[in-house]
Image (tube, grey):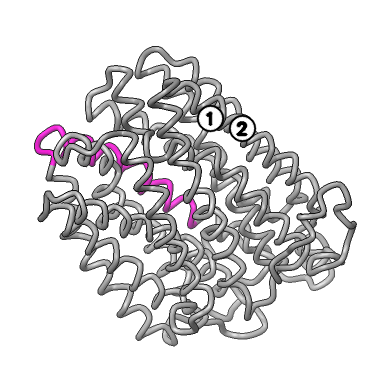
Amino acid sequence: MNDTNHQSGGRSPARWPWLSRDLGLGRNNGILFWVHLIWGAGFTIQAALWTIFIESLGASPTQIGIVVGGGAVIRTLLVIPAGILADRFPLKPVIIGMLAVPIFGAIGLALATEWWHALAGAVLMDLSGVAIPALSAYVAAASKPEDRTRTMTYIFSLSWLLSLAVAPAIGGWLAATSGFRTVYIVGAVLFACGIAIATRIDDMRPARDTDDASSGEPTIGYRQLLGSPGVRVVLGFHLLVPLLVFTGITLLPNFMNDERGVSVATIGVLASIGAVVAFGTSLLVSHWKPLTRPFMGMTAILGIVSISMALMLSFTALPIVAFAFMLRLCFSPIWSLMASAVAEVTPERVRGRAYGLCEFGVGIGDTTAPIASGSLYSVDHRLPLGVGLVTTVPLTMAALVAHRLRRRFTLVQSTNAVSDAEAISATGG
């Protein structure tokens, strides 16, 4: 990426002095941390109540799955071209434009009166995922390789968890006192505030704008990316992690409410308390060297989520149910670990497409898992957790094996596959 200010220089954000606190991430990534904190609160304020809200509109478990997965379908279809945009056009307009779309989604949900009305709002909320290739490429380019996992964990995980520590409790209180619609109106305001802050970042142009023309290197497309063993391994986990884990936990709030008798307000409070535990997990991923290696960190996170599902299935006592729910919230650092893995296996000039390809895998999982979870839940409320548990445990072991064999997953060095100045391992470990 071509950006002379991407570490710490650039304009001084005089209007918002607190934005100068970049947490050692560099100016632009520091701003994106605050963006993701405030903008992300628009999601976290309703995250623990999302499926319960859809149910309140008269949806069956299967219909809940359709609404939750519907937005992911559209996002999945768009992330491949979004990856190409991230490699060909300035990143700032793409990031800001797509992060603004959930404002309209939140307004649509506030106005919904039938469960199928919520589908349109869900699609608009989910379209923010189209920004992921551009946003991930921006963060990767604006950070040093040795700091990449830490930077991505701060932006994509820690900021989210900080908002999760406060916003769900507020959302639960608002839902109990003023109704679900108030929650979504407040969410729209938070989205707008985050966008206002995002306008402060510097723009970056893709490296290929200058590098490819002068070097004469062949254009690299998705077929060439798939020729890399490292890319295939990382793509496989981007598909399987959301598919298997979300099959188990998508309807977890409903399970707690229906089977364990936990109130909506209590679920919101537990989500906020659990964010503190998850925050600690993210700090470990950011600063403890063994866990900064992507697949080793993924092994730990998937293991924690497996324990959460096992406890939720096996016990009915509120303290254990609450603890299991908090462990489930430790899942969020896995996204920064997988994003870091993508950056490690691809050169900068094709990173947008690599993120688009992997986000396509995530989209398939996001689309399929809620529908599968809803269908299983309509048969037996315990089935989603049971299926999630028996499939996530082997996935945990696969992540450990991938970590052990990481040095074998090297990029193919040829004009017919992704190439860079050196062979890069699939995990950077």
Q: Secondary structure at mark 2?
A: helix
Q: Position of residue 229 (x, y in %)?
A: 44, 74
Q: Nearer the viewer, residue 393 or 291?
A: 291
- Looking at this view, is 273 or 248 the one in front? 273
CA–CA distance in space, label 1 to label 2: 6 Å
Q: Is residue 371 magenta?
A: yes
Instruction: From the image, tell me which residue sits under label 1.
Output: 124
User: Is 168 inside the magenta-drawn segment?
Assistant: no
Residue bounds of the magenta highlight = 358-381
Q: Earlier in the sequence, mark 1 or mark 2?
A: 2
Taking the spot 41% from the left edge, 83% from the top edge, the residue there is: 406
61 on left or right of 270:
left
Which mark identifies residue 150?
none
The residue identified by callout 2 is 101
Question: Is residue 195 placed above or below 216 in the rendered structure?
Answer: above
Amino acid beneath label 1: Leu
- Judged left or right of residue 385, residue 77 is right
Name the side, left or right, on which 32 lies relative to 403. right
Residue shown at 63% from the left, 81% from the top: 146
Front-most of 159 and 358?
A: 159
Question: Residue at position x 49%, y 15% from top?
Answer: 111
Which quadrant, please, contains the N terminus?
bottom right
Residue that extends furthest to the top in the rendered view of this protein? 113
Residue drawn at point x = 75 percent, y = 62 percent: 21
CA neighbours of label 2 inside 10 A, class few (<14), some (14 to 19), many (20+) = many
